Image (cartoon, helix red, strand yellow):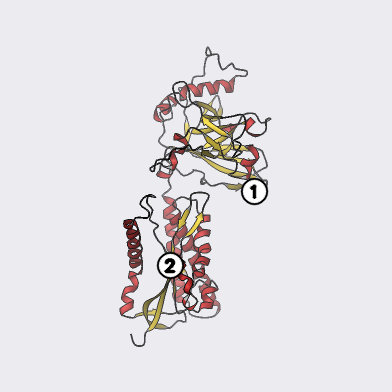
Amino acid sequence: MHGAMLVPIILGSNKTTVSVATGQNDYYPLYLSIGNIHNNTRHAHQNSLVLIAFLAIPKTDCEKEDTAEFRKFRCQLFHTTLAHILSSLQHGMSKPEVQRCPDGHFRRAAYALAAYITDYPEQEFGAPNGLCSSITESKHIKAVKKPWRRSNRFDVLGQMLMLQGSVISAAMMDKVELHRKQGQNACDLDTGAQRFHRDNVSHAQCHNGDEDEDYNSDGSDDEARIHNGPCVLNYIHLAKTPARKYPSSLYALAHHIQQPKLPLLTRWFLHFQLQNNVDPSNNNVALPDLSGLPFSVFHSATSTFYAPSDLSGLGGMHSECIQSTPSWRKGPARYDTVFLEKDPEIPGMGGLHIGRVFLFFSFTYDGIKYPCVLIQWYTTFSDRPDEDTRMWIVQPDYDADGECELEVIHAHCILRGAHLIPVYGCDRLPSDLHYTDTLNIFRAYYVNKYIDHHAFEIAF
C-alpha cells in the first residue's frame, strides 16, 4: 500500500416517507461519499453525496414484528445487502487500483470503509469529523422526494432511478461544458457523460415501447392534473382508443363481462334518449333493436371540471382520470366511484348521486354516438350528513335477488370521481384483506368531502 492514495468510503442511510395520506410510502436510500472531500463542500450540497441504492424494508404481521426471528432476518438482510453492494470495492481494499482523479492525474487508490452515518439515538454522543445525519437528510429532497413527485405512482422505484439518472447526466454534461470553457482536457468526462446519457435514453425508449394495455390510451395516468381548456362547468370524454379483446356484439359483450342485464339496460337507456316523458313503469313498449350494432369498450375516461381552488389551468379547469378495468396495471380490477348529477338546481348532495363505474362503452345509433356507463347506484343512508364527521354516508343498492342495482346512463352525467371511506364496525378486519376489495365487502361508506377543495364545495 506504500505510495497509494487512501479513499475512505463513507456510507449513510436514512429512511424517509414521501407520502403519508396516500399509503405511507417509505423508502430507505443508501448514499455514498468519500473522505477526501472537504466538509464545507459536502455540506454545501455540491453533489459530493450520491445515491447508490434503495435498501429493502422487510415487513410482516404485527404479531411477528417484534419476534427474535424477524429481527435476526432483518439484520441478516441488511448486512447481506451491504456486502453485495460493496463487493466491487473489495479488490481495491487489498490491492490499490489505478484511478483518474478530478485534477486529471492518475493515482493508485486504496479503499477503506471509514464511517456509516445513521440517525439513531445512539448518535447523540457526537458526529465524527463533522459527519452527521443532516447530510443524508438534506439529500432526500433531491434524490427521493422530488423524483417521487414527478412519477405516476406506479412502479415508482424504476421511475425514480430514471429521473435520478437524468439529473446525474445533466450534472455531468454541465461539468463537461465547464471544463471546455476553462480550456482543460475533458475527453474522458465527455465520453462518460455521453455514454450515460445514451444508455439512459435507450432505456427510456425501451420502457415506453412496452406499454401496458391498461394504461390510458391518451397518455394520461390516474393522477389529477391541470387543464388549460375553456372555462365551463364540467365535461367528460372516453379514452381515445378502445380496449382490445372485447366482443363488438352487445350480447357477446354481456356474456364476456358476465353482466347478463347489459343488453336490456342499454336498450332502455336508448329508449329514454329517443323518447320524451317516458313512463318507466310501462313495460309494454317497443325497445330499439341493437343486435347488429358494433360496441366499443374503454377502460378509462377523463373528467374535466371547474375547480379553481385546486391545482388547475389558466381558466380554473382541473381534470382527473376515472378507471373501470378488470385488471389495473396487470393487477386486480379497479372500478372507480363517481359523483353523478341528479338535479343541477339543487345544491350539495341533494342534487348528486354516488355510483360505481363497472363499464365504459359506446355505440352509434342512427348517426348519433352515445358514450355510456354501466353504473351501480349508491343511496344516502340519511337525509343529512353524519354529525361527527360531517360527511354523507351512502350504501350500495341491491335488487330483490341480492344483485347490484345497475343502470346504463349517459357518460355526461358524471361530474367527477368520488372517494369513499368504509364505515368500520367493531370487528377486526382479516389480516389478508386487500385494499382492492374495500368497495366489495363493507355495507356503508363515507363520502369523503375532504379529499380536495372541489369535493368540499359540492358534497355538503
Distance of label 1 from label 2 (alpha carbons) = 38 Å
> How many discs appear?
2
What crowding class fits label 1: few (fewer than 14 Cα within 10 Å), some (14-19), or many (20 or more)?
A: some
Mark 1 or 2 closer to N-term?
2
Picture quadrant of residue 253 = top left
Q: Amino acid at mark 2?
A: Arg
- In this view, 340 is above or below 223: above
Instruction: Note whether 267 is above or below 172 in the view shown.
Output: above
Looking at this view, is 138 or 328 the one in front? Answer: 138
The three-letter code of the residue at mark 1 reads Gly
Q: Percent from the top left, x then y, of residue 405?
A: 49, 26
Query: Tag on residue 313?
Result: 1
Locate the C terminus and report the quarter of the image it occupies.
top right
Q: Please give the residue where the numbered disc 2 appears in the rendered image.
A: 195
In-front residue for pair 80/330? 80
Q: Quadrant of the N terminus?
A: bottom left
